[in-house]
Image (cartoon, grey):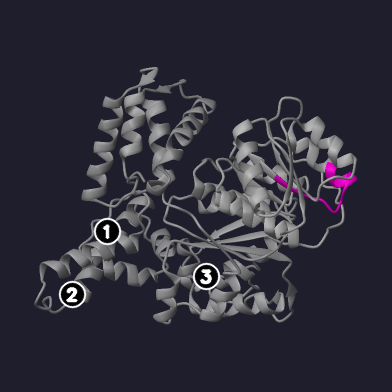
Amino acid sequence: MTGKSVLIADDDRAIRLVLDRALSNAGYDVRATDNGSTLWQWVEAGEGDIVITDVRMPDVDGLDLVPQIRQARPEMKIIVMSAQSTLLTAVKAMERGAYEYVPKPFDLDELLSVLERAASSPAESAESDEAAEDEKLPLIGRSPAMQEIYRTVARLMTSDLTVMIVGESGTGKELVARALHDFGQRRNGPFVAINMAAIPRDLVEAELFGHEKGAFTGANTAGIGRFQQAQRGTLFLDEIGDMPLDAQTRLLRVLQEGEYTTVGGRNALKADVRIISATHRDLGQLIRNGQFREDLFYRLNVVPMKLPPLRERKEDIPDLVRHFIDQAAASGAPVKTIAPDAMMALESHSWPGNVRELENMMHRVAALYTEPVIGGEIIHQELAQLQTVTTTGVTENESLSSAVEKHLREYFEAHRGMLPHSGLYGRVLHEIERPLISLTLEATRGNQLKAADVLGLNRNTLRKKIRDLDIEVVKGRKS
């Protein structure tokens, strides 16, 4: 028997009955009411050790009661429940001093576990946090998987712990990183994002830590790094699995010692930065292959967050669709509504590009079709076009390395049982090198000096490759 007293406020009679019976059986002394006024009277009278309150009640907003209770009874633990299962609700509950936020419908065993922790945890002092202002929601969805994301974000509001976000491309890793920053204690500092996969490997260290004049070829002036830009804020390292090993060693030293030096520099600089990293790759496999430092992984993976692919949270699709349609309308596109058969088609799709793919489709549909109501025929047509792109080429979310790997895998599958003909390495390089140089020349309108600079090649080397690969150079061609 716990000997703890629990006060429950919820206007749903069925929930009160279920909680009364379950908590009484677990050894708690339970009092329940359907309104906030009675709950407040009990609190003021010194009754109860733990409060469970709903947000929406006929006479008061449960969230407004939280700071009042914390002020009057600092030792009292408050558990907030709500069917408004959004990130903002979770954040507001935690900011106002709630011990825990539990979304409805709740799992009874999970709620009892929360109660047990609340009953056994030491009393805390009152805090003077103000309520969060109403903000545009950075994350959308009410599925159980998203509820766990919201709760994690809310729990980390007063922490600078390093977070590792794992998920497929297009699942919203940067949105989660921004939410961690925007609702965290560094919210007034800068949020700086850098994508490891988008930076030439030999420039990663200079991009991160800055460089001194003359530190390397082309460094005609000193450069400020992302760590310095993110001082007193958050640095988001996207696609951390693509970071070169040398840069990994430098980053590990920053995490261990809290300081770094610029490339070519000698003076140590303080790194007052919170690190959030993300990847869609299997870091465990990279560690086994010797491509990622195990000690760095443990430093980055203090708080792991796994984002579910859209196919595993299809109940969120209607909310996401409405959000993206409204977003498109706010940007000037005509106002649209989605017909039921269209929504069913959207919910049945597998969405390999995840939320980003859905967002792009909704913006496209809102802009290109004149019909005020988007029906199933239009959606099926759009999905068919997506399927064609996915099966015949590179999707918008697919990296170049992934595309090359896919085609090479198909090549080896076609030669199952025997090794490919010799010279494969040269042929693959040739197939990639020719269009790369050709398109770069096209983008620079035939300016070989500029193209060489873009490619990072010596001008004479570029000229030789143009001859060897028989590439036509057209001056003034539009980029």
Instruction: Write the residue at 71% across / 82% down.
Output: 266
Residue 11 x/y as whole percent: 67, 30
Q: Nearer the viewer, mark 1 or mark 3?
A: 3
Q: Amino acid at mark 1?
A: Pro
Name which residue lies at 47% across and 71% down: 201
**Circle 1 residues within 10 Å: few <14, some 14–19, many ≥20:** few
Residue 62 pos. (x, y %)? 74, 36
Label 1 SS: helix
Q: Give, as a three-letter code, the residue at label 3.
A: Leu
Identify the disc placed on residue 424: 2
Q: Residue at x 34, y 72 (%)?
A: 461
Q: Nearer the viewer, residue 377 or 438?
A: 377
Mark 2 or 3, nearer chain start = 3
Q: Residues within 10 Å of mark 2 (few under 14, many from 20)?
A: few
In the drawing, does residue 320 fall left or right of residue 75?
A: left
Is 145 situated left or right of 375 in this image?
Answer: right
Report which residue position mark 1 lands on: 435
The magenta segment: 69-79
Left or right: where 62 falls relative to 351: right
Pointer 3: what residue?
203
Position of residue 419 measured from the top left corner of the image (x, y, whole percent): 12, 78
Q: Depth check: 132 or 393 in front?
A: 132
**CB under 8 Å between discs 2 and 3:** no
